[in-house]
Image (cartoon, helix red, strand yellow):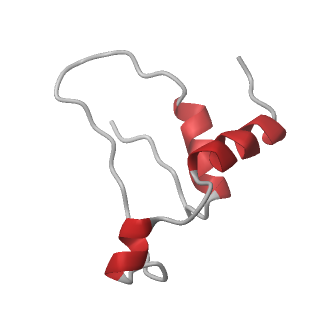
Amino acid sequence: MFFTENEIDRFIEEDFPCFDITTDALGIGDRSGSIIFSSRSPGVLACSEEAARILKKLGAWDVKRLP
């Protein structure tokens, strides 16, 4: 299944209608960060391409798949 750019934008708007209160409270909105998604056991990963597209639209510099 392929999601259009408009659908990706709608997903973002649905999830982030306001601001991130945690980021605001910690005062870290202008700092770079990193995130790693991992699993404790083998499984099936779905929608990883869409997640990467969302992260890139929100300003991620790079999205990598690690072995």
Quarter placement of the C terminus: top left
Report the residue at 40% width, 72% height from top: 23
The one nearer the camera, 17 or 53, is: 17
Q: Position of residue 46 (x, y in %)?
A: 49, 21
The one nearer the camera, 64 or 14, is: 14
| Quarter-of-image position of residue 51 | top right
Q: Is residue 61 left or right of residue 66?
A: right
Quarter placement of the N terminus: top right
Report the residue at 82% width, 40% height from top: 6
Q: Is residue 61 left or right of residue 40?
A: right
Q: Position of residue 20 (x, y in %)?
A: 47, 65
Q: Position of residue 38 (x, y in %)?
A: 28, 37
Q: Is residue 45 left or right of residue 55?
A: left
Q: Position of residue 13 (x, y in %)?
A: 68, 49
The one nearer the camera, 34 or 62, is: 34
Q: Is residue 36 left or right of residue 42?
A: right
| Total marks in image | 0
Residue 23 seen: yes
Report the residue at 51% width, 51% height from top: 63
Residue 33 seen: no
| Quarter-of-image position of residue 40 | top left
| Quarter-of-image position of residue 47 | top right
Placement of 24 over or under 7, stated as above or below:
below
Placement of 22 over or under 7, stated as above or below:
below
Report the residue at 33% width, 49% height from top: 36
Placement of 35 over or under 66, stated as above or below:
below
